[in-house]
Image (tube, rainbow, N blue to C red):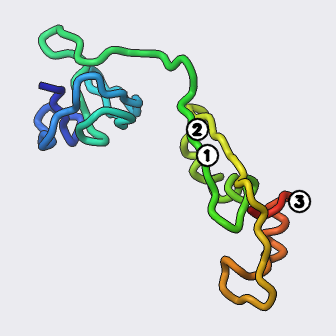
Amino acid sequence: GGILVRRGCELSSPAEDERLSTGAFLLEQEILGERLRYLRLSGTGPPTGWVSLRVKEKPMLQARALSRKLRVLALHGAPSNSNVMKFQSAALRKVAGEDFEWIFLDGPCEWQPVPGATQMNFAERTAMEKAIAKEKPFV
């Protein structure tokens, strides 16, 4: 079962070793004629590729509008906070576009530097890190 996936748009391009699972959730990247280039968001099969929209007049895919945006929970490490995580993920969020809702949380315990420490996770935060943190404590 499943849908045949090809590496290129042409029907003559090589097929992927595995098929796209029935019910997989796809993000449309491009449509050329009756061919769709996708990014797989859920299900199994190749993470990206080209599929036919119809085979012998039978639809292979079903369009479905999202009732809400996909959510991404962004958790920071220590010592950090949600403002630092927002700064660090800015390029990724820009590439992801408006299709995602980003959720940034702060950890529960305030972090304190170890006096005299030189290792990154224990040393006092730099002026740049403090500016990015925007007065929020490091946790």
Q: Earlier in the sequence, mark 3 or mark 2?
A: 2
- Which quadrant of the structure image shows residue 21? top left
Residue 53's tag is none
Instruction: Give the amino acid type for the residue marked by disc 1 in the picture.
Output: Lys
User: Which is more toward the observer, 100 or 138?
Assistant: 138
Residue 135's tag is 3
Rendered view: 5 above or below 133: above
Q: Is residue 94 left or right of residue 16?
A: right
What residue is shown at x 57% (from left), y 22% (from top)?
A: 68
Q: CA distance from mark 3 to mark 2?
A: 28 Å
User: Which quarter of the rendering shows the N terminus?
Assistant: top left
Q: CA distance from mark 1 to mark 2?
A: 5 Å
Q: Is residue 105 left or right of residue 37?
A: right
Q: Secondary structure at mark 2?
A: helix
Answer few, some or many: residues within 10 Å of disc 1's Cα (few below 14, many 20 plus, some between 14 and 19): few
User: Which is more toward the observer, 45 or 52?
Assistant: 45
Residue 97's tag is 2
Query: What is the count of numbered marks?
Result: 3
Furthest residue in direction top, as rendered: 57
Instruction: Give the amino acid type for the residue marked by disc 3 in the picture.
Output: Glu
What residue is shown at x 56% (from left), y 40% (from top)?
A: 72
Q: Position of residue 53 (x, y in %)?
A: 25, 19
Residue 94's tag is 1
Answer few, some or many: residues within 10 Å of disc 2's Cα (few below 14, many 20 plus, some between 14 and 19): few
